[in-house]
Amino acid sequence: MPGRVGVLARWRDRLPVTQRTPALTLGEGDTPLVAAPTLARDVGCAELWLKVEGQNPTGSFKDRGMVVAVAKAAEASARVAVCASTGNTSASAAAYCAAAAIACRVVVPEGKVALGKLAQALAHGARIIVVRGNFDVALGVTRAAAERGGIALLNSVNPHRLEGQKTAAFEIVEAFGRAPDGLALPVGNAGNISAYWRGFVELGAKPPLYGIQAAGAAPFVSGAPVEHPETVATAIRIGNPASWSLALRAREESGGEFAAVSDEEIVLAGSRLASEAGVFCEPASAAPVAGLLRLARERPGRFAGQRLVAVLTGHGLKDPQAAIAQAKPLPEPIAAESVEEALR
């Protein structure tokens, strides 16, 4: 079959699949590593590589875990599936449920989801339920409904999600022939940092993991849940992560750390990724690069000689309004005969 074979086929021997698991795929996985030399210079490392997860089918890393979760739900003859979401999960769940002929329900917090992400879920036929409160409220009621039976839960508390997401760690090690000297990634609900650690450990690799949060939604940095999380990075606007204990273990066992960056640092890092590395990512994806820059400023030389990877979890078109808000106004129109002069 031409193109990407998908996570289930590519990593079948490392995933919880059986002969009865449907061969579901939208071509997820096998995302590129892109070099970022000018950012590497400012981080003070030998190499900085960007794992561009926005090149997954629905534009985010969620597809890796969702294909496994939905395939297992189909294997169990589920007819309805549900997730709480700040955006990316809903888009991925809706797409894979559509491909698997499972009805999808999405619970979103009022006013807290980028419309670009919600548009994807709607396009794939998901039913949207808007709940008053933040993401933590949405996840709480969703889990309660799923626990009463009859509905498959697709959030990262579903262990199959983390199994699929760990395959990104496999790809990185395969590409380099070894683990990187450190890996930074955004942390919201904390499933992804847990999944990367699981993948690295399965390969006998233990690079330090740097979990980067937005300052307005940084429960791991403060050591306590945040009741009213706020940040421009909607994908990590989560105050009480569902995978709290797993993420703490990943940080402790890897010898890494959690750090918080301001919205201003996130926006600047996103701008530099687009203008210097050619990668357009949503705000949450810029957080790990902002975090590495901050850590380097706080301790100059800490990354000297190292090969680092920053995980960019979602495409910039997931939240185009964030980019538009930072853009300069278009110039005033000019006469057609003046265009050539303006081009020089």
Image (cartoon, rainbow, N blue to C red):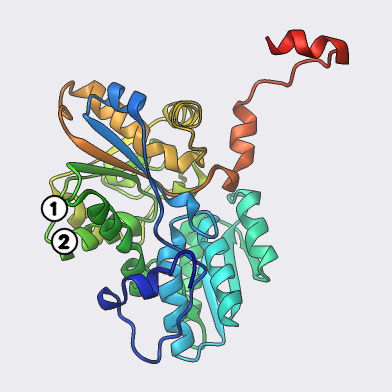
| Residue 234 locus on image (x, y percent) | 51, 46
Task: Classify residue 31 by image quadrant.
Answer: bottom left
| Towards the viewer: 296 or 240 | 296
In this view, the residue in front, 14 or 257, is 14
Residue 256: name its quadrant.
top left
Q: Identify the residue shown where x is 52% and y is 56%.
A: 88
Q: Is residue 170 above or below residue 159?
A: above
Give the x, y percent position of residue 228: 47, 46
**23 to 233, vertically: above or below:** below
Q: Quadrant of residue 262?
A: top left
Between residue 242 and residue 196, name the one nearer to us.
Answer: 196
Q: Secondary structure at mark 2?
A: helix
User: Closer to the camera, 6 or 69?
Assistant: 6
Residue placed at 25% from the left, 44% from the top?
Answer: 183
Amino acid, disc 1: Lys
Q: Quadrant of the C terminus?
A: top right
The answer to whether mark 2 and mark 1 are in CB contact below 8 A is: yes
Does label 2 or label 1 sit earlier along the sequence? 2
Q: Could you tell me residue 22's position as x and y percent?
A: 45, 85
Q: Is residue 5 visible?
A: yes
* Structural distance between the alpha carbons of marks 2 and 1: 6 Å
Residue, disc 2: 201
